[in-house]
Image: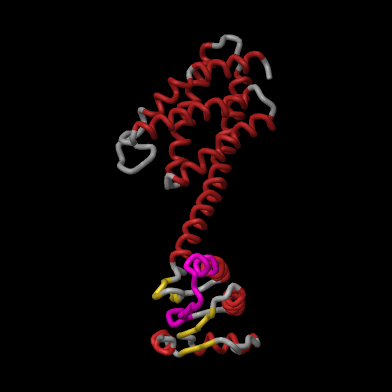
Amino acid sequence: MGQISRNLYDFLLQHKCNMTNEWFQTRDKSDGSTYSANAPEKIAEQLRQQNTEFIEAVSSVFIQEREDYLNSIERWVEKVAEERAQQNVALHEVIAQLRIFRTIYWNYVRKFFGQAEQATSEDALRWSEAMNQAFDYIIENFAIQHYEANKKILASQQEMIDELSSTVIPIKAGIGILPLVGDIDPSRAKTILESTLEQSVSKNLHTLFIDLSAVAVIDTMVAQQLFQLMASLRIIGVQSVLSGIRPEIAQTAVTLGISFKDIEIYANLMRALETHKE
């Protein structure tokens, strides 16, 4: 890169506070938005810092080789996309702010061009192309990283929901109930297996009633994991008692050739508990 591009880079970094201030002046007072003028001061300071880092990353396009400036951009994108996802900021809000700041940033490139006597129209075209490629790359990669970050958040929330929906309820010393509700997919079945074993040990159970009356559908893989759970419970010294098995679930188990031998089964939970009264 030539000296004129280096001078542009220095000019942009010298004015990064001015650019950020101009961007802040465009904020409206919509409630609940990270980008709102009403956002807490802590959020505002975070935005200022991130925008300063953004200017530094984008401006590197004028003085660095492609691989180097892309690395700078990608580090910023990965960090900020994850934070925006955690703050529950919609992607369209971020893109709208990038569009606003693109205009502000370009105005400073134009300002430099107007002041730099040695700058040519070819320089201006080259800078415009480089800047727009950088912004386009940021928007595209931000969308990808924001999507991936949201996927992780949703997966974590779903795992928490699955754990909460497979809570073992102690009813007396050594005895507990696992009431399962709703559809059980392979992912939830795995969580149920792991969580139930941990809870059975921590609650010192010797008998666990597994009630399936509120479970409408169990596929082949889930049925196998359910019986794996009971086998695992047996190994750690916990007796499994099944109740509320629907006909379609029983049919699935029979089709799989799964044996109910040595497993206590009752039509409903009340009957199972009555039978095990001391």
Q: Is residue 1 magenta?
A: no
Q: Does the magenta stretch include residue 205?
A: yes
Q: Where is residue 28 in the image (x, y as percent from the top left)?
A: 32, 35
Boundaries of the magenta span: 197-216
* Residue shown at 57% from the left, 25% from the top: 59
Whether residue 180 is visible, yes or no, is no
Q: In this view, does 99 lie above or below 234?
A: above
* Residue shown at 67% from the left, 30% from the top: 68
* Residue shown at 35% from the left, 28% from the top: 25
| Mark count | 0
* In-front residue for pair 60/259: 259
Q: Position of residue 44 (x, y in %)?
A: 38, 31
Is 121 placed left or right of 14 in the picture? right
* In-front residue for pair 172/150: 172
Is 276 placed left or right of 196 in the picture? left
Quadrant containing the C terminus in the rendered view: bottom left
Q: Is residue 105 above or below residue 260?
A: above
Q: In this view, does 188 lie above or below 131?
A: below
Q: Position of residue 105 (x, y in %)?
A: 49, 26
* In-front residue for pair 79/204: 204
Q: Is residue 206 above or below residue 164?
A: below
Q: Where is residue 118 in the image (x, y as percent from the top left)?
A: 61, 10
Whether residue 247 is visible, yes or no, is yes
Is 248 placed left or right of 1 in the picture? left
